[in-house]
Structures are given as structure tokens and as C-alpha cells.
Amino acid sequence: MNAHMPTVAQEAAAILDRLGVSASARTGGSLIARSPVTGEETGRLPVASVADTQAAILTAETAFKTWRLVPAPRRGELVRLLGEELRATKAELGRLVSIEAGKSVSEGLGEVQEMIDICDFAVGLSRQLYGLTIATERPGHRMMETWHPLGVVGVITAFNFPVAVWAWNAALALICGDAVIWKPSEKTPLTALATQAIFAKAAARFGAAPEGLAQLLIGAGDIGAALVESPKVALISATGSTRMGRIVGPKVAARFGRSILELGGNNAGIVCPSADLDMALRAIAFGAMGTAGQRCTTMRRLFVHETVADALIPRLKKAWESVSVGNPLTTQALVGPLVDGLAYDAMQKALAAAEALGGRVTGGTRVDLPGHYVRPALVEMPAQQGPVLEETFAPILYVMTWRDFDEVIAQHNAVGAGLSSSIFTTDLREMEMFLSAAGSDCGIANVNIGTSGAEIGGAFGGEKETGGGRESGSDAWKGYMRRATNTINFSRELPLAQGVVFDI
Ligand code: NAD
């Protein structure tokens, strides 16, 4: 290494200093932060206790009681300022995302752009929290619905989108009048500290945000669990593995809390005979290898029609063999590191299981760099079985061929997860079939683009083992509010609904 170049840890420390994160928040504690880029230690963070979590919930409850009375457009002003602060710090925070999550520089910046975009969206929404006026069957009456703030929102996030997912939740929750407590992934705590410092700047400029309106708790699953179990937390928005969701979902349901679950994906693409193969090639390559296969929407399965298999699969293999893998901070590599050794082991285990079932593997080998770098794997499978049915959070694309359209749709839907999906076709019938009620069973279904890279304007989330939650755009804001149906009688009579007579 160049003697004058700062280490990754030094660079992270300098960014945190500039963003105003105190040294005491990242030194001397028990949670060791590491950069997957080099494996270097980047901090030792003090962690919250369960008692701290309970105190944070009480503070948030008090903040909520004030915040819910602030007019929504005024609440939007805080989120507008947050968007401004994020614009001003985009380069720094984006770089820190790359350091801590191992993303390419462009993807790190893209993640912060997503935060800015959702702030803009939420500011507009703060004047549009509409309820309906509904025709009533009773004369001299009016019926309408009102959306009220919900309460304290617990946000639990995954390592792979360390800051954007907080923003998707927080921007909406704040304009909806809720207080937010964030438990980020224990693998990416520094970006959370940085984001919290950026929020603090926006709150200081706003001037009137109640104390504890948006809090951060650094810690592991036990802190998440304390949020999940508290009846004072009205909504748990949890993003992570299906394994985590299986624990969190029933616990929140048992106390009749509300949850938004954003869990694992096992996303597929279908290539049809009429597909534009040049376009499909690029979309599949980014979908499957981008972010080193560590997106919830990463393409993990590919069904290629047998008439175009010979034209497409060799080109895919060539792309897999030639894609650049390396340090995302110091090179232009398109594929960065896996998050840790566990991810590497899980990938190798899945590849061995696929080979045992007759899979032919291209790539998948370790790249000799500090950290856990690996060449993306493309596995030609004789059938959809074994590891193909599961999400392995690493760059593995299982490729299979198909002949019959109905059969490939059935195969497409025959996995537990239901997050994202794509079809590559120029045939109108195939396209519409795929998007129809009898087509893809996923929350996201795309035509002629890959499975990953959603925009914030649409509702984001998936069905089945992906958890059913929706975040971000469209009317996802309704998840952060409670609905009251109001009926007002302005007549001098008391007609009962359904014509019931009850004369006393
Ligand atoms: P993970 O499940 O290991 O951890 C996610 C979060 O849950 C962490 O903050 C963790 O501390 C917390 N947690 C773990 N156990 C808990 C418990 N019992 N109670 C409360 N909180 C608990 O996931 P990860 O490895 O960080 O992220 C990768 C996974 O996340 C993949 O499966 C990916 O598909 C999924 N993901 C889904 C989406 C989506 O929107 N659907 C987005 C990003 C990531």
C-alpha cells in the first residue's frame, strides 16, 4: 500500500469526524465494526442494553405525544431539511456506505440518493395524507375517514442497505407523526452513527423536534428483540432474513402489534424466445453480480428458453469469467467483497450442494485479497432443486432451461420467497401473462429490466416468505398511520344503519 494513503479505518474515522460523530460513540466499546473491503477493524462501539432500549421507548412515546399534534406539512419541513443535509453530505455518507458494506462507489452514492429521493417524496406526501369521504346510507349524515399518527415505530435494518432502509421508514414515519427508534445491523453500525448525526443537524435547524423523536440503538438481535416485545412500539418494520422474520413476525402478532416485514428473496428472470438478448445479458449481469449478490432483489434463478439457450448462456459465462472483482474503494471493480467469512462459507456450501445435484459451476472461486472476495458463480442446473430453492446471500445465479410457458411460470413461483421477478420478452401475450393474476406471484414483477434496482416511488416488498410488507412509495405511508372512520349526524333524526328500528 502507498505509505501516504490512509487505511480504510483512518478514512472511516476522518469521515465520522467531519460528520460530527463523537469518538466516544465508536471507541472503547464491545461491538467491533469491520470493513469488508479489507477486513480491517473500523471501530469498537459501545452497545445499548435492554434497559437503555426500554428508556428509549419511553422517551419516544413522550416525543410522539408532542409530534402527533404538529401539522403534517410542518412535520414535512423537518424531512425537507433532512433531505438538504443528506444532499450536502452525500459524498461522505456514500463513501462510508462503501467502506462499511463493501459496495462500489457508485452504489454507495446511489444508496444515499435513495435517501434523498424518499425525503422529497415524503415532503410532498406531508400535504397529501388523504382520507376518503364515503357515501352514507343515512340522510343528514356524513361519513369520512381520518388518518392519525400511529405511535412509536421500531426500525430494524439489514447490513446490505445500511442507511436507505432507515430513510424509507423514517421519512414516512416522521411526516406521518410517529417517533422512530432504529436498531441497525450490528455489521454496519458506523453508517448508522453517521446518519443519526446528519439527522441531528436537520433537527437542530428545524428547532422544534421533540427530544427523542428519532433515536438510534447500537446492538445485536437482543436489542431488536426488546423493541419487538414492547407493547409500546406500535409498529415494527423489520428488514432482514426470513429466519429473523419467523421470530419477529409471531412475536409482534402475539401482542397485536403491527409489523412490516421485508425479508429474503429468491428472485428469478425468465428469458423468452423473442427477448432482446443484448439487453437481457446486461440486465441479468447487473441483477445477479451487482453488489456481489448481496441485494434482497438479486437475481438468483434464471430460466432460459431452450431455443435461445445456446445464444445466451455462453455469453453469460463469458461475462461471469471476465467481470472485475476487487477493492471497490481503490479500483473500478464491478464486484466487491462478501460481507464476511460466514457469507463465503454459505456460498461454498451452496455450490457444493448444487454440484452434487449435477450443477455445472462457472466461477465461485476465492480471489486472493484481504477480506472475502469471490468470483461470482453461474451454475447450470438440470432442475430446480436443493440450494436453488433457497436464498444464499452471495453471487450465485442458477441457470435452467424451459420449453412450456405455463410450466416455467409454475417453476418460477415454486419457491418460498416472493420478492422480485423479471421477464425478458417482446411478445405482448407473454408479458401480460407474466404480470397477470396467474403470472408472477412476487411483490415486484418487471418486464425487460432486471430484478434489482427499484425506484422509491413504487411500493417495495414481497409476498410469501418475503413477509408481505410494503415500504417506500405508493400508499405505503398508510402502514405508518391508523385509520379512523367517522360518521357525523347533522340531521334532527337518528336513523339507524341497515334500517334497524329501536324505538324506546
Ligand atoms: P439478518 O436477518 O441477519 O439481520 C437483520 C436485522 O435483524 C439485524 O439488525 C439483526 O440484528 C436483527 N435481528 C436478528 N435477530 C433478531 C431478533 N430475534 N429480533 C429482532 N431483531 C433481530 O439479515 P442480514 O444478514 O443483515 O441481511 C440480509 C438479509 O436481509 C437477506 O435475507 C436479504 O434478502 C434481506 N433483506 C431484505 C430486504 C427487503 O426489503 N425485503 C432488504 C434488504 C435485505
Image (tube, rainbow, N blue to C red):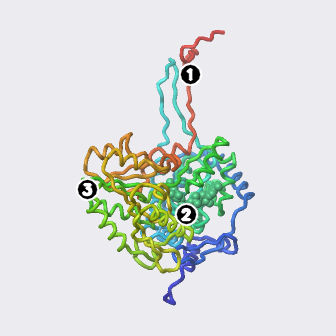
Q: Residue at 45% of width from left, 55% of height from top?
A: 385
Question: x, y (%) of residue 139?
Answer: 50, 17
Rendered image: mark on residue 159:
2
Q: Which of marks 2 and 1 is in front?
A: 2
Q: Which of marks 3 and 2 is in front?
A: 3
Q: What is the distance, in whole Å, between disc 3 and disc 1 at their CAs? A: 67 Å
Observer able to see residue 204 = no
Q: Residue at 62% of width from left, 11% of height from top?
A: 502
Q: In which quarter of the image is residue 9?
A: bottom right
Q: Name the residue under label 1.
A: 489
Residue 69 relative to residue 436: left or right: right
SS state under label 2: loop
Q: Could you tell which of marks 3 and 2 lies nearer the N-terminus?
A: 2
Q: What is the distance, in whole Å, between disc 3 and disc 2 at their CAs? A: 40 Å
Question: x, y (%) of residue 1?
Answer: 49, 87
Residue at the top extreme of this rendering: 503
Q: Nearer the viewer, mark 3 or mark 1?
A: 3
**Mark 1 is on which residue type?**
Asn
- Residue 357 vs residue 282, the one in the foreground: 357
- Residue 289 vs residue 208, the one in the foreground: 289
- Residue 284 vs residue 385, the one in the foreground: 385
Residue at the right extreme of this rendering: 51
